[in-house]
Image (tube, rainbow, N blue to C red):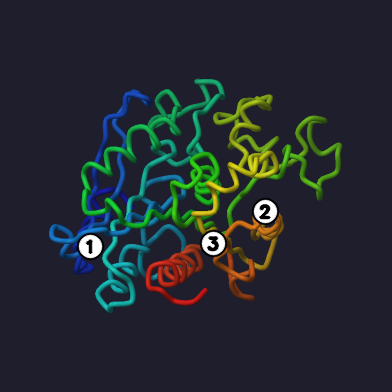
Amino acid sequence: MTEREIMAYHRAASLRGTLRLRRLHSDALGLRKPFYVYEPPGLAGAERVPMVYLLRGHEREWVNVEEDASRQRTSIEKLDRAIAAGELPPLVAVMPGLNSTDNHVPSLGIDMVGPGPERRRGLGTGRFWTFLTDELIPRLDRDYPQTQGGLRLGVGFSLGGYTVSLLALLRPGWLDHAAIYDGLLMWPGHDDPRAAPEATGADCQDPVWCTASIFDAAFGAPRDLQAMHRWNATDRLLDASPAYLQELQTTTFWVGCAPADKDRGNRDRARYFVELLRDRDLPLGFERVIIHPQAAHTWHWADRFLLTVLRRSLSGSER
């Protein structure tokens, strides 16, 4: 769906709140980048409203009912209905654009190091971490003073889960809740224990992160191993000092996945990441990693995960 179609669809859906399409000129990227914001009803007079960052890649994915065949309503429709029903408190939801305009090249939310010719329209300089953390987030803090003092949450699906892991681990304590559904997380040192050594280069043995051409623009070809280490949340956990782990104690990690792996899910990566968190006594929201025996790497299940996390983290339900 185009931007115009997405906005028309949500107007026809009779939201109680408001979906806005906004743009921010980024000095870091050298261009204007679009993003969507959902504002709940009654926002003007509210205080301490939660701010939720919804991450996947392209800004349209959480608001496009046609993103895959599994969903009947968008994530924002479902959030809006849950707020109207009193199942969730009013919240502001932000959906940043972190991919190329055509959604073919992911930035991963990092400062990209790959060659410029690999980049497409909408990527600019590729400095997306700088855009996200130094420009977009501070701008939203100013634009929505109602969220000051409220909880901050990051919820990511697939590659968006990877970006949430970076927000949680590279800015320790900034997120109150970091939620990852079927995230494509990195192995420590990019050494996939399931991969045959000859499947990749000697210094990079994860067939997905080390050889998939979709990541060439982000990490270079051949890969820039220094950059890959910098943007690896599992490496950050393994290297963590006691003082750093203490900072992370204020973040609850909600990690869920489908019951399958490889082409149909990211179960093994999620399990390993949770083991690292548990070994370091960091707060976990879920007892089990697999959210449902029939869960899949689809928007239907990503939306179910989103609503479950929000209900439990914002409504005072027991975990």
**Mark 2 residue type:** Arg
On screen, residue 219 above or below 282: above
Verify CB contact (< 8 Å) between mark 2 and mark 1. Answer: no
Q: In what element is the residue under mark 3?
A: strand
Taking 155 as reference, is 52 left or right? left
Q: What percent of the width, then of the height, locates residue 160?
A: 50, 49
Taking 176 as reference, is 4 left or right? left
Q: What percent of the width, then of the height, locates residue 275?
A: 70, 58
Q: Which residue is mark 3?
A: 254
**Mark 1 residue type:** Pro
Of callouts 2 and 1, the N-terminal one: 1
Verify CB contact (< 8 Å) between mark 3 and mark 1. Answer: no
Tell me which residue sits at (44%, 27%) in the image: 127
Which is more toward the observer, 141 or 301? 141
Q: What percent of the width, then of the height, locates residue 180?
A: 54, 57
Q: In what element is the residue under mark 1?
A: loop
| Residue 273 in sight from this viewpoint | no
On screen, residue 166 above or below 156: above
Of callouts 3 and 1, the N-terminal one: 1
Tell me which residue sits at (18%, 61%) in the image: 46
Q: Nearer the viewer, mark 3 or mark 2?
A: 2
Of callouts 3 and 2, the N-terminal one: 3
Taking 70 as reference, is 137 left or right? left
Q: In what element is the residue under mark 2?
A: loop
Tell me which residue sits at (52%, 63%) in the image: 298
Question: Residue extending furthest left?
Answer: 45
Q: Quadrant of residue 240?
A: top right
Measured in 3D between alpha carbons, the distance from the residue under mark 3 to the one under mark 1, in whole angstroms, is 24 Å
State the mark number for residue 280: 2
Q: What percent of the width, then of the height, locates residue 130?
A: 42, 30
**Mark 3 residue type:** Trp
Q: Which residue is mark 1?
A: 40
